[in-house]
Image (spheres, rainbow, N blue to C red):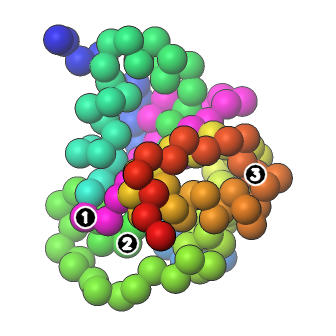
Amino acid sequence: YEPAPLLERESSYIETKCGKAFVIREGKPTKYSILTLHDIGLNSSNCFDPFIHLPDAWEIFKNFQIIHLHYPGHEEGSSNNSNTPIKYRDFMNLISAVLDVLNVELVLCMGVGFGATLLTHFGLHFPNKMLGVISIGPVS
């Protein structure tokens, strides 16, 4: 198959009141956004891009702004192999702060593994910011 074309992509570190986060935004900011969060040891390139850019899936995803949030040290090419534990509450606050900085009021979340678990907890703590969650293989 021939992968669908990439939308305009922007990679950046975003400073928030809860710390710095690495984000890749794909597509133009619209009323509708999808936030992805990968599993530990992965990043958006090897976790979500192969699925999002399948031609059939792309017919849906191309209508959204896609926000790929990365765990600290998981961005592609990072030499930061920090073993610092990620605290649920701190990371949920970081997700909320990133959405605030990007002026995203409501988001559909898609997570894999530990990312699915964190986004499920995020929805429980910030239900006013989450439209829904697609949770693939959450861990306990």
Q: Residues within 10 Å of mark 3 (few under 14, many from 20)?
A: some
- The residue depicted at 69 percent of the width and 57 percent of the height is 123
Q: Which residue is mark 2?
A: 72
**Residue 30 magenta:** yes
Q: Is residue 120 visible?
A: yes
Q: Which residue is mark 1?
A: 41
Relative placement, left or right, of 136 versus 46 is right
* Relative image position of residue 137 (x, y in whole percent): 41, 52
Secondary structure under the numbered disc 1 in the rendered image: loop
Q: Which residue is mark 3?
A: 129
Q: Earlier in the sequence, mark 1 or mark 2?
A: 1
Q: Amino acid at mark 2?
A: Pro
Give the Cα distance between marks 1 and 2: 11 Å
Q: Residue furthest front?
A: 140
Give the mark toward the camera: 1 or 2: 1
Give the Cα distance between marks 1 and 3: 27 Å
Secondary structure under the numbered disc 2 in the rendered image: loop
Q: Are marks 1 and 3 in contact (CB under 8 Å)?
A: no
Q: Quadrant of residue 50?
A: top left
Q: Residues within 10 Å of mark 1 (few under 14, many from 20)?
A: few
Q: Which residues, given as a range, are shown in magenta? A: 24-41
Give the mark toward the camera: 2 or 3: 3
